Amino acid sequence: MEKHNIVCLPGDGIGKVVLEESVRVLDAAGFEADYVEGDIGWKFWCTEGNPLPQRTLDLIAEHKIGLFGAITSKPKDEAFEELAPELQEKRLVYSSPIVGLRQHFGLDICLRPCRTYTGNPMNFIRRGPNGTIEEPKVDVAIFRQNTEGLYGGVEWSNPPSQVYDALMTHPKFSQNFGDAPVKEVSVSTRIFTKKYTERIVRAAFEHAKKYNYKSVTVCEKPNVIRETSGMMYKMAQQIQTADFPGIELWNTNIDAQMMWLTKNPENYGVIVAGNMFGDIVSDGFAGLIGGLGFACSAQYNPETGIGVFEPTHGSAPKYADYPVSIVNPIAMVESACMMLDFVDEQNIAGNIRKAIAEVVVEGKVQTYDMAKMSGKADVVEKGAASTAQMADAIIDKL
């Protein structure tokens, strides 16, 4: 077995503990790796003025594979106030390090799978015929374009004259916003490019073909956002017709999709969307499989082979200060399994997923979310498993 080099990026809040426990699971499962820690997150913004130091970028460029915990992000003004005084004089502006990481390395493909674990008490249920209760099986792979769209960071408040003048050439802008003082105008752009739109759509179809999903759904809003959403759907039509005629192409608007996912989630297979809509719909489906404690993700660049794997939950700082960590590590462990898939260690990934499934269906070890308890510091005393105890239970099943 090849020994791998993995960059661990604990970040903020609960990121450190879920990452540590996931590495324990990887070790127990027989994954051979050397781990090097990279600096990222709020601490480095406050002390260095950069939440993503160049030294961390260099580590990822060298080793190519990263496991990421979580980050804390705050609004612009609040972030500025927490800077060290000597750095405030430089008028630095905070930006999300995970967004910066994605854009720096071109990690444009983001995959967020949402699968039901049998026996999970947090699974979605609905009322069926004649008063019955149904628990539909969810198995959805969401492909989110990760570097463009509304999260691209091209935005202004009080836009400079050249930007404002360009906007005024558009009749919709001049008619609807031309009377607003420029100092009262904020603009966030939604930019799609052909190369990366085609790449995310094609990745979705290739995944559907490889894993025998019957459909790919474009989840956008082309009836209103005609240029960008329309571009993605048109490209999906062309790709499906030319290369994947055996896979059905569906088209849903994001608002309708959020309604349909709670009515018939079992009907969906692969979903593809732009950055923000992909973020929204993946969190919606995550709610059907137990919440963010079960929601994992991969983001990668197929040209360079660089990939970063992370749970989709945040840093949850209020839990980070508890004397015993109570958070569910399964999303991080599942993200580590996606990393194993990426480096061709599918057997180990399969063993870990099987162990998780056995723990969940057995139901003897449950973190507070699975036990439907409020996230108080004393939940372990009341019978919930700690973060470490859940990792131990998974390890015991390997």
Image (cartoon, helix red, strand yellow):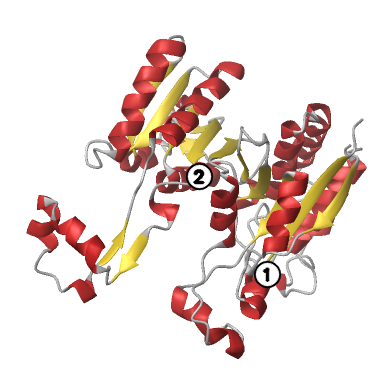
Type of amino acid under label 2: Asn
Residue 45 position, x and y percent, is: 62, 74
Spatial CA span between label 1 and label 2: 28 Å
Q: Which residue is mark 1?
A: 319
Type of amino acid under label 1: Tyr
Residue 115 position, x and y percent, is: 61, 34
Q: Is residue 6 visible?
A: yes
Say which quarter of the image contains residue 249.
top left
The N terminus - image quarter: top right
- Left or right of 355? Residue 46 is left
The one of 131 and 358 positioned closer to us in this rendering: 358
Q: Residue at x 85, y 52 (%)?
A: 35
Lower position in the chain sequence, tag 1 or tag 2 = 2
Q: Is residue 352 above or below residue 364?
A: above
The C terminus - image quarter: top right
Q: Which residue is mark 2?
A: 146
Q: Is residue 270 above or below residue 19?
A: above
Q: Residues within 10 Å of mark 2 (few under 14, many from 20)?
A: many
Residue 224 position, x and y percent, is: 22, 41
SS at circle 1: helix
SS at circle 2: loop
Residue 366 position, x and y percent, is: 74, 51
